[in-house]
Image (cartoon, helix red, strand yellow):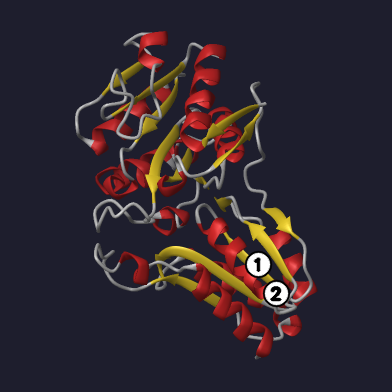
């Protein structure tokens, strides 16, 4: 075990994968000698050379189109989109090419070796072009997998699992935790399962669900709620696509209540998909309406970032209202 922050864990995962398999390539905007805008790829070009870790033009559609071509020919590309907000020019390549290669060819060819990394979310005073959470846009696309780590241990294990998964994977990294989240990380290669949620705390009164940076917010809210005698079961979804319906439903059948939180705006957010599915599965067991605590339906504001984000007090109020309904 080595103590690392999330950036160091991601860098270590890339180093581990590149060391084990020469087909693994790392590329994106400024990822070479500069090490990326957040330094997640530091020293990789120096260690593995410019043919395996290299800069690309500032063209996101080109980055993913290039990655699709590499993956289709047997390479294992790890493409970095500098900010998740910049991923939209590549939307067509991801949803119409990456996600459909295997299906449209009848499994004659695929881009299953593709991994796309992108830092997402607020908390860094980045304003509307550097703070968005676009996971729900891609969750509507069969053929992709979407994962979000909450700490360094998960960041390394989920990234290595994504690189070795036989499907194209989007890894959204909560950038406000890049240096803030620190923990022990195994030095060796290990892989956490994609598509499986993790129950981080067991409880009996209400299920509280989130992913990524919101898990820290949930922990603060739950600590406050439990001082008032409310027993909370906490679930880190980890994988958005596919998401672990069975684990969430089993928890809600026990508690009878569900609070979901994410940074993305309310309308069209992935919490809506979860709420619809769980009410269909658990309708007769629900003791209160499923609550969603999310960002506000506005462009992400700079000056009012704290008001926009779903903080621990908003989550706590939702927990309390759910239990007292």
The answer to whether residue 166 is seen in the rendering is no
Residue at x 75%, y 67% (from the top left corner): 251
Position in image of residue 284 (x %, y %): 75, 84
In the rendering, at what x and y percent does residue 264 appear? 40, 63
Q: Residues within 10 Å of mark 2 (few under 14, many from 20)?
A: few
Location of residue 220 with respect to 124 vertically, above or below: below
Residue 37 vs residue 102: left or right?
left
Q: Nearer the viewer, residue 190 or 268?
A: 190
Q: Is residue 38 above or below residue 95?
A: above
Q: CA distance from mark 1 to mark 2?
A: 7 Å
Task: Point out the residue furthest to the bottom here.
Answer: 325
Name above or below for residue 312 compared with residue 186.
below
Image quarter for residue 45? top left
Q: Which mark is residue 227?
A: 2
Q: Is residue 163 above or below residue 215?
A: above
Observer able to see residue 18: yes
Taking the image as shown, residue 92 lies to the left or right of residue 226, namely left
Dot 1 lies on which element? helix
Tell me the quarter of the image containing the N terminus. Answer: top right
The C terminus sits in image quarter: bottom right
* Pointer 1 with pointer 2, Cβ within 8 A: yes
Q: Residue furthest left?
A: 58
Label of residue 223 in the image: 1
Disc 2, SS: loop
Residue positioned 62% across, 42% down in the render: 194
Image side of residue 129 versus residue 259, left or right: left
Q: Residue at x 71, y 82 (%)?
A: 286
Residue 184 at what x, y percent from top left? 64, 33
Which residue occupies the extreme front position in the image?
A: 227
Residue 133: image location, x then y, percent: 39, 56
| Residue plotted at (71% across, 86% down) | 287
């Amino acid at each position: 075990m080595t103590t690392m922050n999330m950036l160091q864990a991601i860098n270590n995962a890339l180093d581990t994968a590149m060391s084990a398999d020469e087909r693994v390539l790392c590329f994106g905007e400024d990822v070479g000698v500069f090490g990326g805008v957040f330094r997640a790829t530091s020293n990789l070009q120096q260690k593995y050379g410019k043919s395996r870790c290299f800069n690309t033009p500032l063209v996101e559609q080109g980055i993913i189109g290039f990655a699709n071509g590499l993956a289709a020919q047997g390479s294992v590309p790890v493409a970095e989109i500098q900010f998740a907000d910049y991923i939209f020019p590549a939307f067509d390549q991801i949803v119409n090419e990456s996600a459909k290669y295997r299906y449209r060819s009848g499994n004659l060819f695929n881009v299953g070796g593709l991994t796309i990394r992108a830092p997402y979310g607020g908390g860094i005073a980045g304003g509307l072009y550097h703070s968005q959470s676009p996971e729900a846009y891609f969750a509507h696309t069969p053929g992709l997998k979407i994962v979000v780590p909450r700490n360094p241990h998960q960041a390394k294990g989920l990234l290595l699992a994504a690189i070795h998964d036989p499907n194209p994977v989007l890894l959204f990294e909560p950038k406000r935790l890049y240096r803030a989240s620190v923990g022990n990380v195994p030095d060796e290669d290990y892989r956490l399962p994609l598509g499986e949620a993790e129950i981080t705390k067991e409880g009996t009164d209400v299920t509280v669900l989130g992913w990524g940076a919101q898990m820290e917010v949930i922990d603060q809210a739950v600590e406050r709620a439990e001082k008032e005698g409310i027993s909370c079961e906490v679930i880190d979804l980890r994988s958005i696509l596919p998401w672990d319906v069975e684990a969430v439903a089993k928890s809600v059948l026990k508690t009878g209540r569900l609070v979901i939180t994410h940074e993305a705006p309310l309308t069209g957010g992935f919490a809506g998909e979860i709420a619809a599915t769980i009410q269909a599965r658990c309708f007769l067991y629900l003791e209160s309406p499923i609550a969603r605590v999310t960002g506000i339906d506005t462009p992400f504001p700079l000056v009012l970032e704290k008001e926009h984000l779903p903080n621990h007090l908003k989550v706590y109020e939702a927990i309390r209202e759910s239990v007292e309904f």
